Image (cartoon, helix red, strand yellow):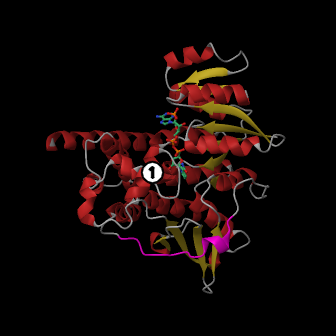
Amino acid sequence: MTNIAILGSTGSIGRSSLEVIERFPGRFRVTTLTAHRNIDLLREQVACFRPDTVVVSDERTAEALRHHVNGHTAVLTGDDGLIEAVTRPEVDVVVSALVGFAGLTPTLRAIEAGKDIALANKETLVVAGDLIMRAVREHGVRLLPVDSEHSAILQCLQGEDAKGVSRLILTASGGPFRDMPWEHFSGITPAQALAHPTWRMGSKITIDSATLMNKGLEVIEAYWLFGLPADRIEVVVHPQSIIHSLVEFVDGSIKAQLGIPDMKIPIQYALTFPERGPSVSKRLDLVSLGTMTFFPPDMERFRCLGLAYQALRAGGTAPAVLNAANEVAVQLFLAEKISFQDIPGIIEDALAGHTPLMEATLEDLVRIDTQTRTAVHQRRAVVE
Ligand SMILES: NC(=O)c1ccc[n+]([C@@H]2O[C@H](COP(=O)([O-])OP(=O)(O)OC[C@H]3O[C@@H](n4cnc5c(N)ncnc54)[C@H](OP(=O)(O)O)[C@@H]3O)[C@@H](O)[C@H]2O)c1
């Protein structure tokens, strides 16, 4: 029996993870569930999975929750609660599915406590790839990607010698504005940006998909997971989201992983790796699919992708600045305080004002994240 803690159980990845776990009753047990705001759903999940521990963000919510859970489940709060929950001895695997920078510290502490990680929270590797990969090696844990693109690459690499790999090719749906002329970008509303054509996801990653920042974050994630330099990690737009990514080898052969766009497939692969288990997800019907198409990304209309490559090449803490500025910009856009077109400019300004620090500690990264967020808000205040 593998004991699983789910960070962010009320989110899109958290809910899909629980659906996967339910299908393997003798194999997986849920020890830990965590939520931020969606306490009603958390209560339902507690009743269904009877975890040892739940974590919520504040004490008032925790107090209310304690009246609903029986004595079997401990209710913890805040960042300390997240860290305590994931480092408990009974936990074997942590599904890291918080959104944004909030996922970094609990994921790092879980690795240091010797837990295997199923990583959805790509921001953890974007912000602290060096720190995380060193901790993974030092503590001998397994860090398996949940992101469908990186799961696809992992699957393509099975049985292959790393020396034989020439390129990684990440596919991107292109988002809802793939074919929209630049002149119309100024009128994009949050509701339009939240309507992703192929995937149903949380709001932050959906906006990142619309700007192509999500693909930029994934390029940085691939760099850390698979150890190839930026110029050997490419992006191709594939609107059908059927090929989840590809690996090209030195002999010119390309391996791809295909499937319907359903996150339960890569989540299950991360949890059962290296085995495969039966799945009730729909099957891909190639004949009814008929056609698959591919385009180069438009780096002029979607400048966030180029900014992510720029941050990766700058190295050190540059990707942490990219991430912090992007998180603030996405929040401001969702709150209708800035336009969709403003997002790349905010990130570009933040990167321009930063001299990267190499081999940063967690404390350095927390400080730089906070400084960047403050600077972005201050700059916005001046503009307004
Ligand atoms: N969704 C996908 O298909 C997908 C695919 C690949 C990778 N990912 C990555 O997986 C991660 C999660 O994405 P998602 O789409 O599942 O996000 P989501 O639906 O927004 O869920 C985020 C989860 O984190 C919790 N949370 C949010 N802010 C928090 C905070 N400050 N402290 C503690 N908990 C917090 C939320 O709690 P409440 O719901 O209670 O507020 C929720 O449980 C992201 O890094 C994303 O890039 C997602």
Q: Residue at x 57, y 62 (%)?
A: 149
Residue 225: name its quadrant.
bottom right
Q: Is residue 350 left or right of residue 57?
A: left
Q: Position of residue 368 (x, y in %)?
A: 36, 44
Q: Position of residue 110 (x, y in %)?
A: 62, 40
Type of residue at label 1? Thr
Q: Residue at x 66, y 44 (%)?
A: 17
Residue 151: name its quadrant.
bottom right
Specify whether residue 288 is in view: yes
Return the residue nearer the eye: 34 or 220. 34
Q: Residue furthest bottom?
A: 251
Instruction: From the image, tell me which residue sits under label 1.
Output: 206
Check the image and report above or below for 352 versus 47: below
Instruction: Identify the magenta region.
Output: 284-298
Q: Is residue 364 left or right of residue 40?
A: left
Dominant secondary structure of the residues highlighted in magenta in the image: loop
Quadrant the C terminus occupies: top left
